[in-house]
Image: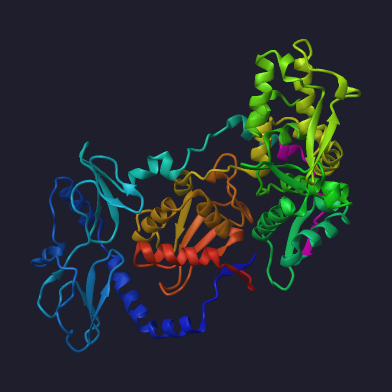
Amino acid sequence: MRLRFVSRSNADAVILETQREDVHRRRNYESRWQASSDEHLQNNIAALDAGLRMNFAGEGPVDESTDDGGGPLPTGWDMQVAPNGRKFFIDHINKTTTWTDPRNGRVSALATRPAGRSSDELGMLPAGWEERVHTDGRVFFIDHNTRRTQWEDPRFENASIAGPAVPYSRDYKCKYEYLRLHLPKPSGNTKCELSVRRTHVFEDSYRQIMQLSVAQLRAKLWIEFDGETGLDYGGVAREWFYLLSHHVFNPYYGLFEYSATDNYTLQINPHSETCNPEHISYFHFIGRIIGIAIFHGKLLDAFFIRPFYKMMLGKPITLNDMESVDNEYFNSLIYIKDNDPEDLDLYFAVDEQFYGQTQTVELREGGANEKVTEANKDEYIELVIKWRFVSRVEAQMKALMKGVHELVPSNLLSIFDPNELELLVCGLQKIDVKDWKDNTLYKGGYAPNHPVIHNFWKCILSFDNEMRARVLQFVTGTSRVPMNGFRELYGSNGPQKFTIEKWGNPDMLPRAHTCFNRMDLPPYGSFHELRDRLTVAIENSEIFSGVD
């Protein structure tokens, strides 16, 4: 596996060097800040639940002013801001910290929100809810309707914000376990080694995959990117599938096309031969890639039309399948089905656009002269659907399925229905943040209620689904979630939940260990700082030539 990081400019490095002393001081505070007693915490929550406001440790009157304006600090003193937004003061002479301002003896204000419905980047809390910050920096929520407190943001229960709940399928899980049990076993302790260039991942993968035997493709995957030192314990392979998906299924290469002008699902391009004379060999390669992904338990990053999966399973395609692919075409066929087509002057032929030219294609021999009537309209609709999805891509689909069946026998693939096959190949499309949060582990001093972790999940909630997928891809190597959710994430040694570990300083960017589904997250002092740094890391990630 490799370590992921983001390079910073020399100018940034100079600025960060000048801040190193401040970071060291902040660490000293953090160790004190994390040592708050649980007993004090429980007492304070109870008081807040009763609608009271407590001063920290009873240290005199609280200064509510956010504007410093107190003049210069005494010699040897420094002022910093705690992770919960509260100002504290450092006495470097005596090496102590305090909430009390040495200039006027007033205690800095405790960061809190006004009573009522709190609102932030995620929108309003539900009616009757309030967000508060405890003296140790941890955020909690008060439900004034039931007079209860809890750590979890109630907005995690809102599907419009957190995403749809994961529909657990015991039937699918049984089928998946059956598949894994009965797949042909690799022979010996061998590896399927591939070395590809990032800039030529499609061509390099095609050349090497097509030269390997089926037995070699079933061996343990071992992927290397040219010029990058690293060990592949699973994370590199996941990234390879992710990158390869974005090339192989890109309509730019002419092997696939978008199913409709307003739909970004993919279908096989019936005119792929005009783009690539060797297209049949490439579809054989694509079939092998799909088979390798299923065999090794990986996911592809693509959105195929539903009929594609039905064709993979050899199931008939019906009129209803047309609706999700091309709604306008579907409505036309429904009209024909529900009405007498005599006046429409239709024949058993269709017009097809090909490079700006209109071509007439007969649905059967002599169809251009055979009129559609009330008596034969059902047959016409059936032939149109067959032409639309099957006949035009029959050769390509045959080559693709040849590649799939080399890795996954047809009798094992046939136990799945089209919906399950889509999940097997591509995983879930929508990310359920609550499920993600519920199946995350913490290390290095982080815990579910730590202020930095609170800000992390608040950040994830504020992202749209695309950005959430990019965070997931940054940490795990894939933007897809297994069928039964985050509980089934896999790492290099089997099941491995998403993990966040405390690491580094606030002047550093997050880094990821894709083989272990782990993100190293520095202790950023605010939500906005965390969101900005995480965004920079994701959008500018590079590969670090190191071994973890």
> Which quarter of the image is occupied by the N terminus?
bottom right
Q: Residue at x 19, y 68 (%)?
A: 66
Q: Residue at x 77, y 13 (%)?
A: 373
Tell whether position 186 is magenta: yes
Tell whether position 1 is magenta: no
Please state if 421 lies on the left or on the right of 254 as rendered.
left
Please state if 531 lies on the left or on the right of 358 as rendered.
left
In the rendered image, residue 8, in percent from the top left (x then y), is placed at 52, 77
Residue 45 in sight: yes
The span shown in magenta is: 179-195
Q: Residue furthest top?
A: 375
In the rendered image, residue 466, in percent from the top left (x then y), is placed at 53, 51
In the rendered image, residue 510, in percent from the top left (x then y), is placed at 49, 67
Q: Residue furthest right?
A: 365
Q: Image height check: is 313 above or below 191?
A: above
Q: Residue at x 39, y 82 (%)?
A: 20
Q: Residue at x 76, y 33 (%)?
A: 389
Q: Image height check: is 156 above or below 17?
A: above
